[in-house]
Every structure is written in structure tokens, then in C-alpha cells.
Image (cartoon, rainbow, N blue to C red):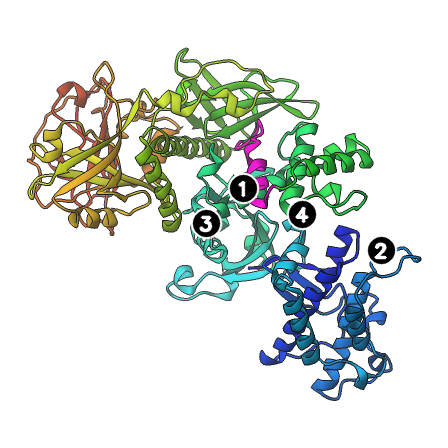
């Protein structure tokens, strides 16, 4: 969907008249658009003005009615000023030709000194004069204009008109969408209610996109966040939609979960009054550390959000950095710097109010132009990417106000949750300063109990308690930590598969990214996280607070390439892992004893990156099954798996080590346990018809639990789905017994787990005897 800006706004932004080639291209595009109106059964307008000619970012041209506040007398045909209406379409055409001619005259004369003549060729001047004749019969008609423009384009070898319009339509995208009509979407009845929808329960949601565009969504009060999100994604044609979410503002941004009913988070007025609008914001929920991993379209959405957040002082930024970023934004949106002395941009659209208040306007404008000039020759994509690479200290941090438990301070305390962990900020003189960091690797548990949000450190076992305004906020912070922690694991694994391999696999990884974009999903697995306990200066960026991911993980994971000869009876048991609606990849759940993989000896439980040169990144379980079934006798596998440690255990994420299959009593909302229960649907099923042998094991609980972590459950898309042992807790009952491995769990204490959902399995396990 194109974004529009008026011709008047273009001239105001550039501060100078149109050049002759630009006038020719504009005249051609306008003539074609006017001739196209009757073909679509529309009526040609009688008056055009610089404020009613719309230029699109995609190179198209359109018209709108003149605003009431516009002085359009000088653009109105003489016969129309005398009160004569157009008796025919031909008469209306003559009137609009006059308006178009006067509009183009205005463009070539814009802001020229009175003593400076208009610069244009005799051919163009003659054509414009013929368009602006006072007597209608003497004016050129649209077909004559079209023929003249086409001939001039051919002889002068001008660029296509749409290319020039794209160049004219410059400036911040969030200012160009203001005049664009609001898109109205309505959730289908099949989603709203099987019995149909009642007008009394319909409400309006206003969804604000990163570029400032507003989309109106009509839905029922009980519509779920996921349904609204899916509709916005479909309308926007986003490829990597999984990085985003819908958020509402309640002093801070809060993301709406997919299964949450809108009425649960909307204000009371929205539920009671049908005409009340509830505003949601389409924002980034997951921030990548490596911007190059992003699809071009996703990168642009990141850019738009950061532009707005910087302007609105949502992100802390040093003055010089802000001016440098403003110069990159100018290069992205205007191309190369305009000649000196031309006021082609508004400084307040490129630096925040806080910067403008510290410096005089001429200084800000001069510095922005200097930085803009330094970026000459950079393409828009290049300057946009450079803008995003300047990751600020608060990049990817979600801020929430809290209080310290029993330790009130004079200053304000803010918790920052990001993919790397939790950051504690102290606010002094309106600025945030880092007071403490809790990286995931250094954290044992994160929990909530009523209004309290608790972080327990690994080494010291010390607990840090923060108090929120409401219990729901404390629980929300737990959930936010859980999904950010999970995302960090996934992205670490994704980056690993691109960096710890040979040249051939590096080339393969590039193909994976392309395929992943097409499939609109990404594939990742859990990997160890930050083990850094370093103390760094407060001014350092978040990126510098963490050690290099690849260097840390290289000793803990390996990417191997194995060629196996298929056995018609024995093979691998593989499964897929998902979080919500995000595909996390195809995983090897276990090795069939005596099969090719078992005999090879190199393969452990890990993520299956490719099978027989076919990327499985973003593939569904069924697609992977089809690839395996259709593969030749010899199959090449590329696998990302943990290396064996000295104590015989695979490298595991530190938080996941404390997950014990929901059988440990919990007093509050734990980070790792409830999120695994609600958001994870780890599915495993055999790709081979032959099943492994069934083994009966008797275990005695240790500290009230069996020491296993489970996953899976009933899923309509996987007829062979079941409950699986995901992992064994180190030192737990199952590990000490030594006979259990990650595999399918058939029954416990005589209770058959076939057909069980995940929650049913958890409840059954929690009720078992010692």
C-alpha cells in the first residue's frame, strides 16, 4: 500500500522550484492519471491545486478534493469562477487542464525572487501557456498533452515518470502517511463467532504501525490478540512477522499475548461504549543482535520504530550520536545532500525535542547537513542499515517502573528486560543510569508472587525483590523474561549455524535465510547463554556488556556433517519444536538403537539443519517427513548439537537445568516452568514405521520429583503425537537410575498417556506416589 504526500509538501520540504525534467515527468503522469479516471467510471475534478495532487512512494500519482482552507482561486478556470458549471465531460476536461497548467507554473516559480525569471525551455513554456488560455476552446486537451509529453520523453530520453515521482516523494515516512486514508479491516465471522456476530458487541481497535499509519480493526470484545495480529500481518504482507507483537500503553508498553481476549486489557470505556476506540501499537517484541539476519522489509520496520522512538525520547541517546543518526536518516530519506543554502528538511523531524532544547536551531540544522553530506553516495538501504548498526545502550530494552522491596530510594527505579537478561536502572535528573545487571547465565530463577518480582542469583543465591503496582505487572514481567530468554537461545543457535561451519555450509546458511524468508518462519534451538560476570561502565552499550556469542558457544556446541546409509527398518526419531506460532526447527529427539545413526556414533540429540542438501530451516514437521521419506539410500545430515562435557552431560542452558517436568511444587509464577507449559508445544513423532522397544522403569522420587522434563501433547496436525521425555534433570531420580533417555512416555502408575494434552500429563505426574 503506497503512502502519499502532496505536491505542496514536496516543494515546501525542498525549498526550491521543480526543474524542467521534473515538470515534464509530472505533466505526463498527471495527464495519464486524468485520462484513466473515466475508464474507471469516475468523474474528472474541475479544480486541481498543489495541495490536491498526491505523489506516492511507489511512483504513482493521484488526486484529492481541494481543502476548504486552500486559496484555489488562482488555480480555477475563468469560466468556473464566473459560475458556469461544466455542461459536458469535454468542458470539465478543459477546466482541469487549466488547473493543471497553473499548478505546474506555481511549481516552476516556487520561492523564486521577484527579479529572477523562470528557467524553462520555449517548448515547455509554450505548452503551459496553451494549457492556461483564458478562453476554454483555445486550451490544449488531455490527448494533445499526452502526445506532446510522450514525444518529448522519447526524444529527450527522460527517465520513466514513476521513477521521478519516487524521487520527489521524500522525507520521513511517518509524515507522508498522515493524508493517507485509514484502512478498515473486519475480523471474519468465522473467527468472531460460529453463531454470527451481534452489532452490540462489535468494537473498534486502532492499530498504529511503525510508520505512523493507522489501521482500524472492527472486532468483537472477546476477540483474541492473535486474531487481530494475524489480520494486521496479512494486510501488511510482513514476511518475518514473528519479531513483532501488539502492545497497548498503560504508562508503559505491554504486549498482548495471542490467546488473551482484547476485552481483558482494554479500558472499561471501550467495553461499555461501542464508539470508543482502543489503541494498540504494532511494535518490535524481539530484537536481533545481528541486523544482517533480518529480511529487508523487517529491517525497514526496525528503522521506522527506532526513528520514532528517538524523536519521542523513548531511547536515551547522546547529543552527537543523535545528530549522526539524523544525518543517516536524511541520507535514507532524501538521498545525497541538497546544495548548500536550501532548507530541504525540518530539524525537528530528525532529532528529538531534548536535543532541540539544548542547542540553537541554526546549529542543529548545520550539524545535520554536515553529517548528511558525509554520507554522500550511500544508497537508502545502506544508510538505513548503518543507522540500525549504531545499537544504542538501550537497544532492545523494555522499561517498567518498580520499587525496591524494603529499600526505598530517592530516585526512581526502572527494570529493563531484554534478550540478554534484566537490567536495573536508577533515574537521576531525568536520565537512566545502569545500576545492576542480571544476565540469564547468572540467574537461577525469576518468579513473581503477588506484586513482587523476584530475581535469584546463581552464585550467591541472593534474592533481589522488586515491587510492582499490580500483581498482573509482576506476572507479566515473568512472562516477558521467559519469552526473551527463549528468543535469546534461539537466535544464538541460529547465529551459530551460520558461523561455526565450513565455507560450504556458510553458503548453505545464506540459502537457509532466503528460504526462511519465503516460509515466513525461522528455525532455532536452545543454546547456552551469557556467562559473563564482568562489571562495565554505565555508559557502555548493552552489546559490550555481553561477551561475543560465537566465542562463548564455540566450545559448547558443534555443527557436524554426517553421511548415513538408510536402513529400511531403523533410523532416527525426530520432532519439531514450536513456541506459540513460531517454528523453532526440526530436532532429533532420540537415536533408534541399532540403526544407522546409532552405529555411526557421532549423532546426539540436536537440531537437524539440513537433510540431503535440503534446508529444514523454517520447514514444518510434515515437510521434513516428506523430505526424509523421499531421500535416496545415502543421506547427508547437517546437525547442530551440544558437545559432550567432561562430566558426561551435554551443555544445557542454566535456567533449563532447573526445570523438573512440573513436578516440583511452585509457590509463585516461575519464569521457566509456566512459560514452557503454556507457550511450548514440543512435538515429536517417528518418521519410521518401526517403534523402539518398550521399557518399564520404577523410580523413587528425590525431593518430591522424578527429575524429568516433558514436552508434547495432543496436536491435530501430528497424528502420532504424544508425551515425550524432553530431558533429565542432573542429579535427579531419572538420571541416577540411568535407564531413561529422551523418548516417548507411554504410561505412569498405570495411567495411559496416549491422547493426553500437555497439561493433563503434568497434572497426572504431579499426583504420582513417591
- The magenta span reads 378-397
Residue 43 image position (x, y, % from top left): 66, 79
Measured Cα–Cα span from mark 4 to mark 1: 19 Å
Q: If you read the primary sequence from the N terminus, does the residue marked by circle 2 or circle 3 appear first? A: 2
Image marks 4 and 1: residues in contact by CB distance under 8 Å: no
Q: Is residue 389 visible?
A: yes
- Lateral position of residue 491 relative to residue 417, left or right: left
Q: If you read the primary sequence from the N terminus, does the residue marked by circle 3 or circle 4 appear first? A: 3
> Could you say which disc has been placed on residue 225 in the image?
3
Q: Say which element carries label 3.
A: helix
Q: If you read the primary sequence from the N terminus, does the residue marked by circle 1 or circle 3 appear first? A: 3
| The C terminus sits in image quarter | top left
Image marks 1 and 3: residues in contact by CB distance under 8 Å: no
Measured Cα–Cα span from mark 2 to mark 3: 50 Å
- Pair 3/4: label in front: 4
> Could you say which disc has been placed on residue 334 in the image?
4
What residue do we see at 64% from left, 65% from top?
A: 61
Question: Mark 1 = which residue?
Answer: 302
Amino acid at each position: 500500500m503506497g503512502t502519499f504526500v502532496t505536491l505542496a509538501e514536496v516543494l515546501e520540504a525542498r525549498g526550491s522550484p521543480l526543474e524542467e525534467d521534473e515538470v515534464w515527468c509530472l505533466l505526463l503522469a498527471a495527464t495519464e492519471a486524468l485520462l484513466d479516471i473515466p475508464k474507471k467510471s469516475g468523474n474528472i475534478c474541475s479544480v486541481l491545486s498543489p495541495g490536491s495532487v498526491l505523489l506516492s512512494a511507489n511512483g504513482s500519482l493521484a488526486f484529492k478534493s481541494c481543502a476548504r482552507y486552500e486559496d484555489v482561486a488562482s488555480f480555477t478556470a475563468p469560466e468556473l469562477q464566473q459560475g458556469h458549471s461544466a455542461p459536458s465531460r469535454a468542458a470539465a476536461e478543459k477546466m482541469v487542464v487549466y488547473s493543471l497548467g497553473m499548478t505546474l507554473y506555481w511549481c516552476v516559480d516556487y520561492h523564486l525572487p521577484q527579479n529572477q525569471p523562470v528557467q524553462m525551455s520555449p517548448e515547455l513554456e509554450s505548452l503551459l501557456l496553451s494549457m492556461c488560455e483564458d478562453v476554454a476552446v483555445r486550451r490544449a486537451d488531455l490527448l494533445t498533452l499526452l502526445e506532446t509529453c510522450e514525444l518529448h520523453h522519447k526524444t529527450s530520453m527522460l527517465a520513466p515518470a514513476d521513477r521521478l515521482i519516487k524521487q520527489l516523494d521524500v522525507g520521513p515516512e511517518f509524515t507522508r502517511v498522515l493524508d493517507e486514508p485509514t484502512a478498515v479491516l473486519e475480523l471474519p465471522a468465522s473467527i468472531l463467532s460460529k453463531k454470527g456476530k451481534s452489532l452490540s458487541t462489535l468494537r473498534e481497535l486502532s492499530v498504529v504501525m511503525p510508520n505512523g499509519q493507522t489501521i482500524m480493526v472492527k472486532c468483537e470484545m472477546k476477540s483474541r490478540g492473535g486474531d487481530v495480529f494475524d489480520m494486521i500481518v496479512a494486510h501488511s504482507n510482513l514476511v518475518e512477522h514473528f519479531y513483532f507483537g501488539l502492545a497497548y500503553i498503560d504508562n508503559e508498553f505491554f504486549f498482548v499475548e495471542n490467546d488473551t481476549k482484547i476485552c481483558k486489557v482494554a479500558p472499561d470505556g471501550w467495553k461499555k461504549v461501542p464508539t470508543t476506540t482502543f489503541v494498540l501499537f504494532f511494535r518490535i517484541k524481539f530484537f536481533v543482535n545481528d541486523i544482517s539476519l533480518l529480511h529487508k522489509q523487517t529491517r525497514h520496520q526496525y528503522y521506522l520504530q527506532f526513528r520514532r522512538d528517538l524523536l519521542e525520547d523513548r531511547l536515551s541517546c547522546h547529543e552527537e550520536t543523535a545528530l549522526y543518526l539524523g544525518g543517516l536518516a536524511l541520507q535514507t530519506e532524501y538521498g545525497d545532500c541538497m546544495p548548500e543554502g536550501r532548507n530541504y528538511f525540518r530539524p525537528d523531524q530528525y532529532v528529538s525535542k531534548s536535543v532541540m532544547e539544548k542547542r540553537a536551531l541554526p546549529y542543529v540544522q548545520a550539524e545535520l547537513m554536515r553529517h548528511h553530506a558525509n554520507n554522500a553516495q550511500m544508497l537508502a538501504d545502506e544508510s538505513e542499515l548503518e543507522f540500525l548498526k549504531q545499537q544504542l545502550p538501550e537497544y532492545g530494552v523494555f522499561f517498567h517502573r518498580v520499587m525496591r522491596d524494603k529499600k526505598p530510594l530517592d530516585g526512581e527505579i526502572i527494570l529493563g528486560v531484554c534478550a540478554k537478561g534484566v537490567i536495573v536502572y536508577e533515574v537521576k535528573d531525568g536520565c537512566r543510569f545502569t545500576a545492576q545487571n542480571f544476565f540469564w547465565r547468572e540467574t537461577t530463577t525469576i518468579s513473581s508472587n503477588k506484586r513482587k518480582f523476584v530475581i535469584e542469583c546463581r552464585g550467591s543465591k541472593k534474592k533481589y525483590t522488586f515491587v510492582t503496582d499490580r500483581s498482573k505487572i509482576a506476572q507479566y514481567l515473568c512472562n516477558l523474561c521467559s519469552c526473551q530468554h527463549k528468543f535469546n537461545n534461539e537466535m544464538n543457535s541460529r547465529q551459530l549455524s551460520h558461523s561455526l561451519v565450513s565455507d560450504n555450509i556458510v553458503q548453505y546458511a545464506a540459502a537457509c535465510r532466503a528460504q526462511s524468508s519465503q516460509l515466513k518462519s525461522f528455525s532455532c534451538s536452545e543454546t547456552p547463554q551469557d556467562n559473563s560476570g564482568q562489571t562495565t561502565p554505565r555508559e557502555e552499550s548493552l552489546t559490550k556488556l555481553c561477551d561475543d556469542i560465537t566465542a562463548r558457544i564455540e566450545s559448547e556446541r558443534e555443527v557436524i556433517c554426517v553421511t548415513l546409509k538408510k536402513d529400511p527398518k531403523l533410523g532416527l526419531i525426530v520432532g519439531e519444536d514450536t513456541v506459540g506460532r513460531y517454528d523453532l526447527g526440526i530436532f532429533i529427539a532420540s537415536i533408534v538403537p541399532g540403526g544407522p545413526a546409532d552405529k555411526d556414533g557421532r549423532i546426539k540429540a540436536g537440531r537437524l539443519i539440513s537433510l540431503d542438501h535440503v534446508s529444514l530451516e523454517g520447514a514444518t514437521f510434515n515437510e521434513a517427513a516428506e523430505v526424509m521419506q523421499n531421500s535416496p539410500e545415502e543421506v547427508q545430515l547437517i546437525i547442530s548439537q551440544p558437545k559432550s562435557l567432561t562430566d558426561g552431560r551435554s551443555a544445557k542452558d542454566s535456567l533449563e537445568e532447573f526445570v523438573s517436568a512440573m513436578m516440583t511444587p511452585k509457590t509463585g509464577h516461575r519464569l521457566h516452568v509456566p512459560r514452557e507449559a503454556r507457550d511450548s508445544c514440543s512435538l515429536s513423532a517417528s518418521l519410521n514405521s518401526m517403534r523402539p522397544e518398550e521399557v518399564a522403569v520404577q523410580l523413587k522420587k528425590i525431593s518430591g520429583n522424578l527429575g524429568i522434563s516433558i514436552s508434547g501433547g495432543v496436536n491435530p496436525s501430528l497424528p502420532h503425537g504424544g508425551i515425550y521425555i524432553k530431558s533429565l534433570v542432573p542429579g535427579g531420580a531419572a538420571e541416577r537410575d540411568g535407564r531413561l533417555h529422551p523418548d516417548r512416555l507411554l504410561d505412569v502408575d498405570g495411567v495411559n498417556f496416549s491422547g493426553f494434552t500437555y497439561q493433563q500429563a503434568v497434572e497426572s505426574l504431579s499426583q504420582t506416589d513417591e
